[in-house]
Each structure stands twice: as C-alpha cells, then as structure tokens.
Image (spheres, grey):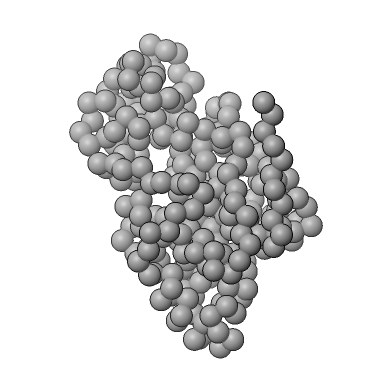
Amino acid sequence: MPRGARVKSKSGIYHIMLRGANRQEVFHDDEDCLKFLDLIHLYKLKTEVGIFSWCLMSNHVHLLLKEGNEDVSATIKWIGVSYVSYYNWKYRTTGHLFQDRFKSENIENIRYLLTVVRYIHQNPVKAGMVKRVDEWRWSSCRQYYGTHDERRKLLDSDYIFEMFSRDNILARERFIEFNEMANQDECLDHHVDERRLTDEEARDVIKKLLNEYEIEIAQVKSLPRLQRNEILKKTKKIKGLSQRQTARILGVSKTLISKA
C-alpha cells in the first residue's frame, strides 16, 4: 500500500527527524557535522526556510523549521541527497544512508513549538552524551545562550525570544530557564536507546578495533562476508558495548551481528 501524502501544517512549522538507515551513524567526525550544517545554510538561503532549533546526534538529526518558498519535503530531500553524495565520496561507500522517509510532525501552537525547541536541545542530555544542554557542540542551544558566534547565521532566534519578552536580555534569561527545565517531553515517538557505553565511548572502541584492519567505520558494511563477520565477532566481546549500538554505528542489522 502506498504511503499517504504528508498533511500540511497550517502554521508552516514542522519538527523533522532524519535517521540513519538501520540506525547507523551518519556523522563520524566534526567535518561531517560541519558539512551538514553548511548544507542546511545553503538551502536556507535558497528556499528562505526559517530555522528555530536543530541538533545533530551521531545517527539522527532534529530540525525545527518553517517552510520557505519550496515544499518542506523537497528542501529536506535536497539537504539529504547532497549530504549522502558527500558522505559516499568521503568514505568510499555506496547505498542508503538515511531511512527512506524522514519523520515529521506539524507544529500548530506556540506551547508545543516551545516544547519541541526544548526537546531538541535536551536530546543529548537525555541520551547521556553531556550533563548540560549547552555542553553539546552540535545544536542551536549555544546560539540561543549567546555563547557561540554562528558564522552561518542558521538560527532565527528572534521569533522564539519574542515569545518570552520584547527585552532581549530578559527574553534570553527566561528562555534559558525554560530550556533547562526538567520534563518528560516526548516528540515524534522518539525514545533514546539505553546503553552501557555512551555512543562516543562505543565509537572510540570500535575505531580502535578497526585500526587493526586499517579501515573506516563506514566501510565495514561493504566488506566481504567472512571479513565482516570476523570484525562483528570481536565487537561482541567488547565489554559494555551492546549489539544495538554496534549495529547503529556500523550501519548493519542487529540480526547480522547476532549470527556472526
């Protein structure tokens, strides 16, 4: 059965989530993150899309945006295709990188809009990557806090600040208080996987293992079966590393790891 068309948001505002296929990693280093942000900036200029919040995690992306002069699906598709082209060139790999269809939800009121901004910024904290929202480099939080000069000018923060106060200083103070408030927010049915190691720790130990073979993380899924299984068997012996994490980082199925 074909999938139905997305219901258009009356406000034009959407919460978008792009996830790696099979929950695989899509960002392996700082260069990858910077490239993705450059592409968002490029298509922001082309389509006049408004950006209210963003966060890059190892295997998924959150964007809170307002549709510009092009359909939001087309904008996200262009960003995704451009990044995949860069990724495949850099890591000498082929095939799908992102899930076929990105997730989205319509934002139709101010209360939920602010909830999603906070949810996106708290994503790295709830995933156990950092202790404070402003410690995560790859989100819009630091731009809101005024502690980082964003050269790309991705963020349209005035739209959000005006909901707290017309006075810029007071608006920022109130925003920070709201942004760090404890909550049980859940958006897009996204739940953080429980892990014994953080993704950063898991990625590091896998990279050390792969150094023995002189290959990159992105190349593992394309290896011959016997060589790939040899590596997967070794990952299962790493203390504190779950098979779910390994599958997500290497871009292979959990079943494949179990059978290795």
Q: Position of residue 51 (x, y in %)?
A: 62, 62
**Residue at image point 69% right, 48% down:** 7
The answer to whether residue 54 of the structure is visible from this angle is yes
- The residue most toward the bottom is 167
Seen as rendered, the residue at the extreme left is: 239
Position of 57 relative to 113 (above/below) = above
Residue 18 picture location, percent across and down: 56, 44
Q: Residue at x 73, y 45 (%)?
A: 74
Q: Is residue 250 above or below residue 198?
A: above
Quarter of the view holding residue 208: top left
Against 194, is 207 above or below? above
Q: Which residue reaches farthest top?
A: 226
Image quadrant holding the N terminus, namely: top right
Q: Nearer the viewer, residue 253 or 139?
A: 253
**Horizontal side, residue 22 vs residue 86: left or right:** left
Front-most of 238 and 151?
A: 238
Q: Position of residue 197 (x, y in %)?
A: 27, 42
Q: Is residue 233 above or below residue 108?
A: above
Residue in the image at 44% along x and 26% along y: 252
Q: Position of residue 242 (x, y in %)?
A: 29, 33
The quarter in which the C terminus is drawn is top left
The foreground one among 226 and 163 is 163
- Across the whole image, how many numbered discs are drawn on residues? 0
24 relative to 132 in the view: left or right:
right
Q: Determine the residue positioned at 44% across, 54% down.
A: 186
| Residue 214 visible here | no
Looking at the image, the residue that sits furthest to the right is: 69
